[in-house]
Amino acid sequence: MSDPVERFLNEQVILDTTTPIVYIGRLIEVSKHAFVLCDTDMHDCREGHAGKELYLAEVSRDGVTVNRRQVVVMKEAVISVSRLADVATDL
């Protein structure tokens, strides 16, 4: 059985973690233990003016600010995966 997240390959995704850190980037690989993103914004929501939901709405509207060319995120740190295109900005 394949990983259900594989359907998001080559799309911009959000990896929400158990920490205040959120990853937003293009999903290029899914392995047994990790997700690999490229052109990624690794954002610590303790910094800046916005909590996670507001920050994600801003990124959905304004685009991703890349601060990592590639990042490997261990699956054990991730609590959800969603497409950036699925962020509801009109709530």
Image (tube, grey):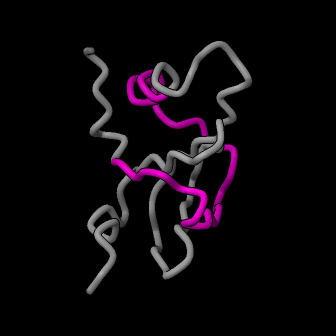
Instruction: Give the x, y percent position of residue 80.
Output: 42, 51
- Magenta-colored span: 56-82
From this view, report whether residue 16 is shown above or below residue 8: above
From this view, report whether residue 45 is shown above or below residue 48: below
* 2 falls in the magenta region: no
Residue displayed at 45% across by 74% down? 30
Residue displayed at 55% across by 77% down? 33
Direction from residue 13 to residue 19 in the image, left or right: right
Residue displayed at 39% across by 23% down? 61
Q: Residue furthest bottom?
A: 1
Q: Quadrant of residue 41?
A: top right
Could you tell me which quadrant the C terminus lies in? top left
Instruction: Give the x, y percent position of residue 24.
Output: 52, 45
From this view, report whether residue 74 is shown above or below residue 87: below
> Observer-nearest residue: 5 or 11?
5
Residue displayed at 45% across by 46% down? 14
Q: Residue furthest right?
A: 47
* 71 falls in the magenta region: yes
Direction from residue 51 to residue 81 in the image, left or right: left
Q: Quadrant of residue 36?
A: bottom right
Instruction: Give the x, y percent position of residue 51.
Output: 57, 21
Instruction: Give the x, y percent position of residue 20.
Output: 65, 36
